[in-house]
Image (spheres, rainbow, N blue to C red):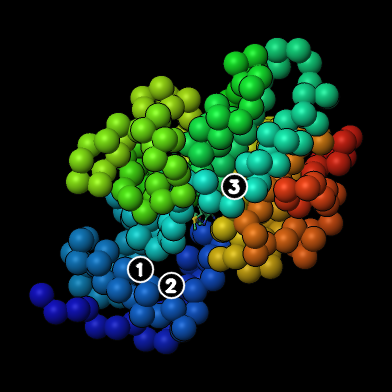
Amino acid sequence: MSDPIPATEDEFRRLCEFLYRRTGMIFTEVKRYYVERRMFERMLATGAGSFASYFARLRSDVNGEIEQFINTLTVNETYFYREDHQLQCMTSDLLRERLRVKRAGEPIRIWSVPCSTGEEPYSIAIWLLENWPEVDQHNIEIVGSDIDTRVMEAAQEGYFGKRSLMRLSPALIAKYFVDLGDERWRILDELRQSVRFTPANLVEPGGTGLHGQFDIVFCRNVLIYFDEASRRTAAENLFENLSSGGFLCLGHSESMSRISPLFDVCRYSDAIVYQRPLGATHV
Ligand SMILES: C[S@@+](CC[C@H](N)C(=O)[O-])C[C@H]1O[C@@H](n2cnc3c(N)ncnc32)[C@H](O)[C@@H]1O
């Protein structure tokens, strides 16, 4: 079957505006090929014969089409122990600081948003087991969230390929994964059960409130896809989702100082992180 007719400039602009409002991600003419290929895929899958009929279907969200289309557009690149200097900072400094202000027995809550296919939240779990001797004395809750429901399903299943595991030592792989052959591994059930996955959209105003407040949030390698307005909305959501004095870790090319004055900058020996100031009121 041949490709559907390409969208006109005006149609493409309307599609990009719609996607921006839903995801905060900026698509322009430069990304036309990328977006259009995915739209053609969805047109073929849904039987829509023209841009107009597909766009109508998308806007009315027939059979969850918005979610289906967003799932095809996201960039889900991730791997275990990515930017592990921040994991080091978590066990060297951040947890100690959080424990100073918590009541005995109160859970320590850590959020990986976006979590993509799960490598980040599972890395947090493995890192804690390996590098935090007092791990067994605390009640730790790890949550992974993403706008893309397809990657979260994969995260829950816990199957990984060689590329995902490239930064883990053979000893760690042998300890925490079952080798399935053909360069496929499955993370141990015990670890799969230690992370809870639930969807979240960082740019929906107030849209992450359901997840409650966290001691540490890892929000890495997503703000780069947003424009300034979406970054600010994401920053406000993250602020609300942090406990007073809670910490935020961003990706290495992302800086909260350029986005929002809500957070304090904390320089530790392993990483620069952002903190919701103790006692700061809501946005
Ligand atoms: C490059 S991955 C980053 C994964 C992981 N944090 C890491 O650093 O390895 C970016 C993820 O952001 C997710 N994403 C994009 N827009 C989002 C939004 N508005 N809210 C939540 N997640 C979003 C995508 O689905 C994708 O899985």
* Placement of the N terminus among the 4 image quadrants: bottom left
For marks 1 and 3, the one nearer the N-term is: 1
Mark 2 vs ligand 1: CB below 8 Å? no
Q: Say which residue label 3 marks.
A: 84
98 and 72: which one is in front? Answer: 98
Looking at the rendered structure, the kind of residue marked 3 is: Asp
Query: Which residue in the rendered view is the most extreme toward the right?
Result: 279
Q: Say which residue label 2 marks.
A: 15
**SS of the residue at dot 2?**
helix
**SS of the residue at dot 1?**
helix
* Badge number at residue 224: none
From what the image shows, is residue 193 above or below residue 226? above
- The nearer-to-camera label among 1 and 3 is 3
* C-alpha distance separating marks 2 and 1: 7 Å
Looking at the rendered structure, the kind of residue marked 1 is: Phe
Residue 138: image quadrant is top right
